[in-house]
Structure formats: structure tokens, C-alpha cells
Image (cartoon, rainbow, N blue to C red):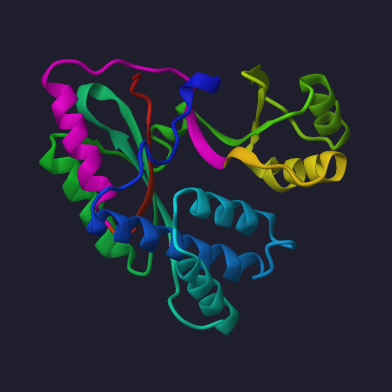
Amino acid sequence: MGRAYQNRKDSMAKTSDAKARVYSKYGREIYVVAKAGGVDPDGNLSLRGLIDRAKKDQVPTHVIEKAIDKAKGGGGEDFETARYEGFGPGGCMVIVDCLTDNATRTFNDVRLCFTKNNCKIGTQGSVSHMFDHSTILAFKGQDEEAVLETLMMADVDVADIETEEEIVTIFAPNTDYGKAKQALADAFGELTFEVDEIQFLPQNMTEVTGEDTETLDKFLDMLNDLDDVQNVYHNVDG
């Protein structure tokens, strides 16, 4: 399972415009998570993990602090989650996660990306049942058996665990994210996570070849350029 998941960004954005989009997406997500679960990272494990990811992606501290300050105010934008599913080039399966303050605009923008690339947007649940919505935590320096025992004692439903090059990676249901992180912190203290995310992992991979490969790249670029899009998941191998 470990090799099937994809990091939310393959590489650091190189242009200033692309960096600004990355900062904006992190800022929006930090604001929503802090507003929902509290602005203290010590008491909001989802926020702590998100801040750690932002720092790894070189998001400036002032962007993070501004988003948290906005959440402290309690007002501001009223973002909601939106998820769209469908079929991309070569029949691959695609899930698009968004944060939006205008669901109609976001749906129209996402649908346009599908139609311009001869793809088909589907109904809710049309492809997500073929993905596992998973917590993924990876860290160095711990024994796999000890980690598994710790999580099982905390009633975390571990789907898979593997060790490669001294990095232990665990996979669990998305609903067990907080429970898993708390159990690890209680047992091993402060850990530095190589991966600390909730993602959709495809149950089966597919290959996209020929002209569909170029279309897929264009399709994904169009989706990722939308301000409201936070993450795009697919089941294309490679």
C-alpha cells in the first residue's frame, strides 16, 4: 500500500505565482482547521500536523500566523468543504477536494476542467468507494512491533504498517487520525513526521498511455490552478 500513495505536491513550486497559490491553499486550510478545532496546536492535532506540513513546504511563518489570527477572530470567510468525483483521461478515477465560499462557482470551475479535457464528472460516491480514506503517518527511529502494539492498545484500526530505510509508515482510517497521533505522542514523545496526512488511497491502480498521458497532465494542472481546489487524488500508476 505504501508505494501507492502520493505526496500532495510532487515538488516545490518554482514560480512566484505558483508559490502564492500554495500559500493561499495552506492559509485557507489552516484557517478552517483552526476555526473548527481551536487555535492551539497542542490541543488541535489536526492543526499541528497541518502547520508541520506547511513548514516543510516552505510556507512563510507570517502566512501561518495570519491564518490562525483570522480564526481567533471568529469572523471572516465562511468556507465549506466540497468534494467532486469523476473519470479522467483513459478512464482513471479522480477525486477533487475543495474549500469554498461559493459552492456554485467552485462546481462550475471544476466541471469546466472535466469537460475541457473530455472527462466525465460523476455523482457523489461514484468513484470514492474505490479509494480508502486513510491516515498516513511516517517517522524514523521506532520499532515496528512496538508501534503496532501501541496503536492496537489505543484501539487504532491499523490497516497496514511497513518499515523501509528505518522509516515506519502506518496506515489507518481517517477517523483514527487524532487517536493515532495521541497514542504515538504518549508512547514515544515528540516525533518528527516524514509524512503526516489524510489522503485517499486507490484500491487499484491503472495505467494511462499515449495521448491520454498529455491530457491527464493538462487536466491535473487545470484543477490545481483553481484557488478552491485543495487536493486532487487519482489512481494512475506512475
Q: Is residue 175 left or right of residue 80?
A: right
Q: Is residue 207 left or right of residue 125?
A: left
Is residue 148 shown above or below 58?
above
Quadrant of the frame with the C terminus: top left
| Residue 183 quadrant | top right
Along the line of sight, the residue nearer the viewer: 107 or 64: 64
Residue 209 in magenta stretch: yes
Count of all numbered marks drawn on residues in the image: 0
| Residue 80 quadrant | bottom left
Stretch of the chain drawn in magenta: 197-226
State the image coordinates of residue 97 (x, y, percent, origin top left). Answer: 40, 48
Q: Is residue 133 left or right of residue 8?
A: right
Quadrant of the frame with the N terminus: top right
Residue 216 in magenta stretch: yes
Which residue lies at the image location 81% right of the left edge and 32% below the top edge?
151
Q: Is residue 9 left or right of residue 137?
A: left
Which residue lies at the image location 19% right of the left edge and 45% below the top edge?
113
State the image coordinates of residue 115 (x, y, percent, origin top left). Answer: 14, 42
Is residue 234 shown above or below 20?
above
Which residue lies at the image location 15% right of the left edge and 30% below the top edge?
215
Is residue 149 shown above or below 221?
above
State the image coordinates of residue 142 (x, y, percent, origin top left). Answer: 77, 28
State the image coordinates of residue 88 (x, y, percent, origin top left). Answer: 24, 31
| Residue 35 quadrant | bottom right
Which residue lies at the image location 73% right of the left edge and 44% below the top edge?
181
